[in-house]
Amino acid sequence: MAQNNQQELGKTLWSIADRLRGAMMADDFRDYMLSFLFLKHLSDSYEKSAQKELGEEYHGSLQQWYKDNPDDVELFENQMRKRNHYVIQPDYLWSNIANLADKQDEELLRTLEKGFKFIEEDSFESSFKGLFSEINLNSEKLGKDYTSRNKLLCKVISTLEDGLKNFASDDDYLGDAYEYLIGQFAAGSGQKAGEFYTPQNISSILSQIVILDCHNPQSGPKKSLSKVLDFACGSGSLLLNVRRQMGKNVIGKIYGQEKNITTYNLARMNMLLHGVKDSEFEIHHGDTLANDWDILREANPAHKIEFDAIVANPPFSLRWDPTEETAKDFRFARYGVAPKSAADFAFLLHGFHFLSDGGVMAIILPHGVLFRGGKEETIRKKLIEDDNIDAVIGLPSNLFYSTGIPVCILVLKKCRNSEDVLFINASEYYEKGKRQNYLREEDIERIVSAYKNRSDIPRFSRNVSLTEIRDNDFNLNITRYVNLSVEEEPIDLLDVNRQLKETDAKIEEARKKHNEFLKELGLPEI
């Protein structure tokens, strides 16, 4: 689908959402809207595959085929699990749901409830328990009784179906629309948006960096990545961007972790909507700082899981509560524990511990991590002395929905063979928007190109030796190394003196002429 058609679809869906939600809060309605898009995507894909499995000679509905061939259903569904990785029984397909809505059928709400439960428990080989846990079809926000709730859902689904029918479908069209809607809902959610959404233009920078060869970034993207991790994945946009940047190159498996249950479900839906098979990703609902994900625990250090690429946009300067035991944690023991007032380095060290020797990690953090003292200075110094910080990239202010402050990207490696740290000051390169600023394609390309080539560009990027960083007491404040001030041209004082004398002479000549005019008019001279 062409880019402008994708944008038009997104705008159409947002208009529908804005029109239908009525008195419901945007965050509440978001969950219904996105769940219905998810169901339609699964259904469309499934029906296409079912048609291929049944053969071109069969043109009836899947519901009718189930009725006509009850003895063959089990074999058919087994084949569909192999072909499509999941099964949706005919009653729960979007086509049937939309038909019930169009007829204002009283069974719509009950059918949706059964359908959501079936998808969670029976559709996939993997369990997607709780996928629709944030969708309360019996909520009074939808109506005071069953009939009124059913009526509203009929209206929402019919309007959505009507809005989608004019757009030709392909594998990604609903996935792209889903991303667009997440962004729009994020824009209206203010501070809450930081919990689940990283703007795509910023995601692109991190994604393009972490897929590069560790030892030779100029050679371009790796041919394959075994494992990719985002330990604060939100709705999964960063992970999907890495997958997009890899193109036809191979990613073994995508891993994400998210603490917020609503956002965790958004991420799982987002993966499936973008064609990531359930066997190709694993999203964990849990607390990253507590490290409660079994696969990341070190019961057997010899089998530690490692990742070739790690991306993250964790909550900025989150307050946390480390204990005495935290200092002994295998992630922090070599560096020290981040202060209670700001968990930024705790997130960083968590991810860095699981980075493979040939991997690349890129994390978005507030500028304070570059220069704050105390425990953070100790951690920063250790990372610098161990030659693990590869680049520091400063971004413009007001790029995020959740904060207007400027942020930075830290790039870390365990495979570095350079004693220079690349500093990029991109704070002047952006397009100003009404509510927030955004990076243009040329801005993204400028940053990524400077990183790949480790370029020294006046007022933009510079390679800085560890000796100079030590001389600055391990302060990584970007403006110390890449100054944006424009050097004033030298002033020739002798030339200035000559010009002043010439000006004085001209003033004196003009005064004499003026006095002559005054004399002719009989007026006193000046």
Image: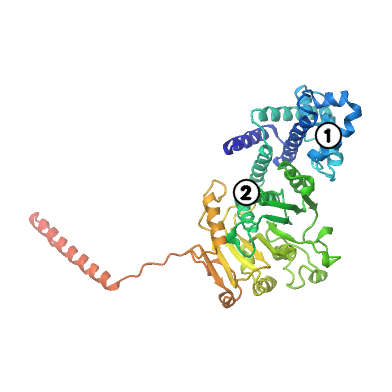
In the rendered image, residue 375, in percent from the top left (x then y), is placed at 70, 72
Residue 292, visible in the rendered structure: no
As drawn, the label of residue 115 is 1
In the rendered image, residue 7, in percent from the top left (x then y), is placed at 60, 38
Dot 1: what SS? helix
Q: Residues within 10 Å of mark 2 (few under 14, many from 20)?
A: some
| Quarter of the figure that contains the N terminus | top right
Task: Tell me which corner region of the image, top left, top right, bottom left or bottom right, holds residue 222.
Answer: bottom right
Q: Give the residue at the far right of this rendering.
A: 71
Dot 2: what SS? helix
Residue at 79 percent across and 42 percent down: it is 134
| Residue 455 vs residue 258, the one in the foreground | 455
- Taking the image as shown, residue 269 lies to the left or right of residue 1, namely right
In the rendered image, residue 148, in percent from the top left (x then y), is placed at 79, 28
As drawn, the label of residue 329 is none
| Residue 47 vs residue 120, the one in the foreground | 47
Q: Is residue 148 positioned above or below 452 on the image? A: above
Task: Tell me which corner region of the image, top left, top right, bottom left or bottom right, holds residue 221.
Answer: bottom right
Residue at numbered disc 2: 200
Amino acid residing under circle 1: Gly
Q: Earlier in the sequence, mark 2 or mark 1?
A: 1
Amino acid residing under circle 2: Gln
Q: Is residue 28 positioned above or below 250 on the image? A: above
> What colouring style does the render use?
rainbow
| Residue 341 vs residue 408, the one in the foreground | 408
- Taking the image as shown, residue 477 lies to the left or right of residue 276, namely left
- Taking the image as shown, residue 420 lies to the left or right of residue 310, namely left
| Quarter of the figure that contains the C terminus | bottom left
